[in-house]
Image (tube, helix red, strand yellow):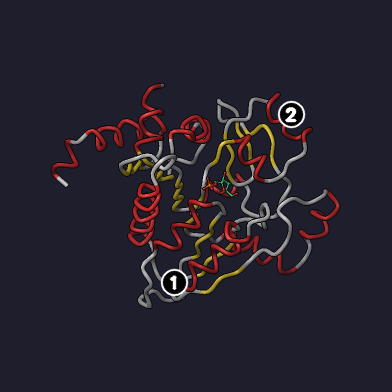
Amino acid sequence: EVVRLWSGRSQMELMLKKYLNIKDVIIVPGNVDNDTNTSMLLSQEAAKYLESILLNEHIIAVTGGSTIASISHAMTESSRWKDLLFIAARGGVGKDVRLQANTIASLFASKMNGSYRTLYIPDRLSEEAYMTMKKEPFIQEMMDLYERTNIIIHGIGDALEMAKRRNSSDEEIELLRSRGAVSESFGYYFNNQGEAVHHIRTIGVQLNQLQHIEHLLAVAGGAKKANALISYFKQAPLQTVLVTDEGAANEMMKVI
Ligand code: F6P
């Protein structure tokens, strides 16, 4: 740790924490864009951090994506936790079940002796469906759980990459381009000033609910995500902790 204190990475952690204006930044060596070993380190570091803040009876909401999915795999199987509840922060996204918040919540729960609640509804809802769904008791229960959530673990993505992954229409992609969308998280798209320029109408954690959550753990790495990270952190709640890699950190440092 003493060595780490004076290493380049620790310096970068301090500088980025200040620049991004968040609680903490943890950087693992390498770049997930071209090194699978780094992906493993990233998820292990995120898993370790999660274990350090977890308390029995916590409610933990998780989003989807490959990064958060691999954290669930990196968690140490343990029966020492009591009454943890993992919930999906969002409905289903895209076609790959393995990357959906629902699946990831159940994986976390089985590893950590907890239970889980899912949101088996499409991620994207018409105005009509949204209004009807909101009145359903099981949805209201989920909304209530979001209000009581202690920890959120979430991914951050490049806006256009995410739009493609979601099979967004050409019109929607054009709209995102014209509004300068750079990053995406929680179904919200942000421009380079961190302004939400578009969002998917969905049941799930809403942006204004994040402020009240005690722990926000954002996990995203890779040089390709640097711009997306800078954009997202223009507006991120102060209590966020970012676990990232050198690939993303080095790129971000270029603009500081
Ligand atoms: O789709 C869920 C989500 O968390 C998005 O909000 C985010 O942009 C994306 O996944 C990140 O995905 P990945 O970890 O695969 O890059």
Identify which residue is drawn at 43% across, 33% down: 223
Residue in the image at 37% along x and 42% along y: 23
User: What residue do we see at 81% from left, 54% from top?
Assistant: 131
Q: Nearer the viewer, residue 50 or 182?
A: 182
- Say which residue label 2 marks: 174
Q: Does the residue labelled 2 lie within 8 Å of ligand 1?
A: no
- Name the residue beneath numbered marker 1: 111
Image coords of residue 10 (percent x, y): 25, 37
Quadrant of residue 34 within the rendered picture: top left
**Residue at the location (63% across, 63% down)?**
144
Q: What element carries label 1?
A: helix
Q: Which amino acid does label 2 sit on?
A: Glu
Q: Is residue 35 above or below residue 256?
A: below
Q: In the displayed orientation, state which residue is furthest to the right.
A: 128
Q: What's under tag 1, amino acid-wise?
A: Lys
Q: Which of 107 and 232 is in front in this view?
A: 107
Q: In this view, does 167 lie above or below 21?
A: below
How many labels sit on residues?
2
- Nearer-N-terminus badge (1/2): 1
Q: Quick one: label 1, few (<14), some, or many (20+) residues within 10 Å? A: some
Whether residue 58 sits left or right of residue 201 in the image: it is left
Q: Position of residue 250 (x, y in %)?
A: 35, 30
